Image (cartoon, rainbow, N blue to C red):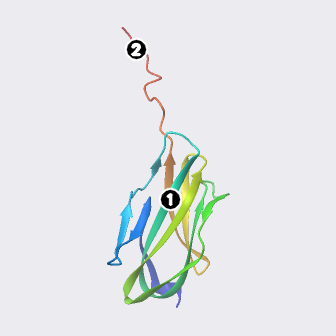
Amino acid sequence: MSENNLQLGHTIFCEDVRVEASQHLSLMGVFHQVVVPQLPITMIKFGIVTHWIGEGQYLSEVRILTPDKMQTVAVSQPSSFTVPPGGYSDNVTVFVNTTFPQPGDYVVQVLINSSLFAEKVLPVILPEQNPFAEIEHIN
């Protein structure tokens, strides 16, 4: 099947994914950005769930790139999934011990059949340690 029949409904970042006995997914620690007290930071588990609509059988890969897109932080093994006619499919990728070395907007790329299909930004934020350090106190 051609990628023309495939649509990416949504992409969700989370700390872990569990498949229940009912075949439903349980997502733990859903987030849209990573706020950390210091860098580099290593995430023990990092899950990416993609929800696909359309039909056909596909091969999916996920890559995480540094904000400048010059280095790869993590790459998944290719995994196949099938979207039944009139249905949907959820594809789960879990990375282990993923290290983010610096703050910035990391790029999560989803490849279908070895071609770039979609990109989503994952901000990694290092807040100021003491936002009031610059303020002088007048007595």
Residue, x 44% and y 69% (percent of image)? 49
Point out the tag, 2 or 1, that comes first from the N-terminus: 1
Total labels drawn: 2
Q: Is residue 14 visible?
A: no
Quadrant (top left, top right, bottom left, bottom right) of the C terminus: top left
* Residue at image coords 56%, 46%: 103
Where disc 1 sits, the SS reads: strand
Q: Nearer the viewer, residue 68 or 20?
A: 20
Residue neighbourhood size for the residue with mark 1, other residues' Cα within 10 Å, grouped as few (<14), some (14–19), many (≥20): some
Question: CA gap, disc 2 to disc 1?
Answer: 43 Å
Residue at image position (43%, 25%) is 132
Q: Relative to 127, say whether 47 is above or below.
A: below
Which of the pair 49/108 is nearer the observer? 49
Q: Position of residue 47 (x, y in %)?
A: 47, 63
Query: Which dot marks residue 135?
Result: none
**Amino acid residing under circle 2:** His
Secondary structure beneath label 2? loop
Q: Residue at the location (51% across, 41% down)?
A: 126
Instruction: Specify few, some or many for label 2: CA neighbours under 10 Å numbering under 14, 14-19, or 20 or more.
Output: few
Q: In the image, residue 2 lies at what x, y percent?
A: 53, 88
Residue behind mark 1: 45
The answer to which quarter of the image holds residue 131 is top left
The answer, for residue 39, to whether it is visible in the render is yes
- As drawn, 31 above or below 25: above
Residue furthest left as drawn: 22
Residue found at the far front of this picture: 21
Dot label at residue 137: 2
Q: Amino acid at mark 1?
A: Lys
Q: x, y (%) of residue 54?
A: 42, 85
The picture quadrant where one finds residue 138 is: top left
Question: Closer to us: mark 2 or mark 1?
Answer: 1
